[in-house]
Image: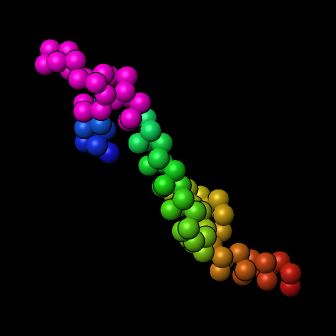
Amino acid sequence: GTLGSGILYTFVGDDYGDVAGSDAIAGLAACFLAGTLSSLMAALITFKIDDNKGGLKCGSCCTIVAAAQEAMEFKENVDS
């Protein structure tokens, strides 16, 4: 990502010569567009991942959402 952004920032836009370089506004806009598209693609990929069976833990001691098997056992214990 960093190298790609650097390439976009450097080479996108009008070239104003060796001293001035290229148009920084167009380069920055290209970086923002590429970053936005990359984030959207990552979000779409993440939605397809089904990893809810393990629950949600914050560290080794704090469980926010119990794992699927543990939740079923807890529900059975409460019901009986």
Q: Residue at x 66, y 76 (%)?
A: 68
Instruction: Report x, y in % for residue 71.
Output: 71, 75
Quarter residue 48 falls in: bottom right
Q: Residue at x 38, y 35 (%)?
A: 31
Task: Specify whether 44 is left or right of 19.
Answer: right
Residue most toward the left? 18
Q: Residue at x 66, y 63 (%)?
A: 65
Quarter residue 78 falls in: bottom right
Q: Is residue 16 above or below residue 56?
A: above
Task: Specify whether 27 is left or right of 54.
Answer: left
Quarter residue 16 falls in: top left
* Residue nearest the observer in this picture, 60 or 13: 13
Q: Which residues are magenta?
A: 10-31
Q: Is residue 28 above or below residue 67?
A: above
Q: Is residue 67 above or below residue 61?
A: below
Task: Specify whether 57 is left or right of 77.
Answer: left
Q: Is residue 16 above or below residue 78?
A: above
Q: Name the image quarter holding the C terminus.
A: bottom right
* Residue nearest the observer in this picture, 13 or 72: 13
Residue 6 visible somewhere in the drawing: no
* Residue nearest the observer in this picture, 37 or 23: 23
Residue 62 visible somewhere in the drawing: yes
Instruction: Report x, y in % for residue 42.
Output: 48, 55
Instruction: Report x, y in % for residue 77.
Output: 79, 81
Residue most toward the right? 79
Residue 25 on the magenta span:
yes
Q: Name the image quarter holding the N terminus.
A: top left
Residue most toward the top? 19
Task: Specify whether 23 is left or right of 74.
Answer: left
Residue 38 on the magenta span:
no
Instruction: Report x, y in % for residue 57.
Output: 57, 61
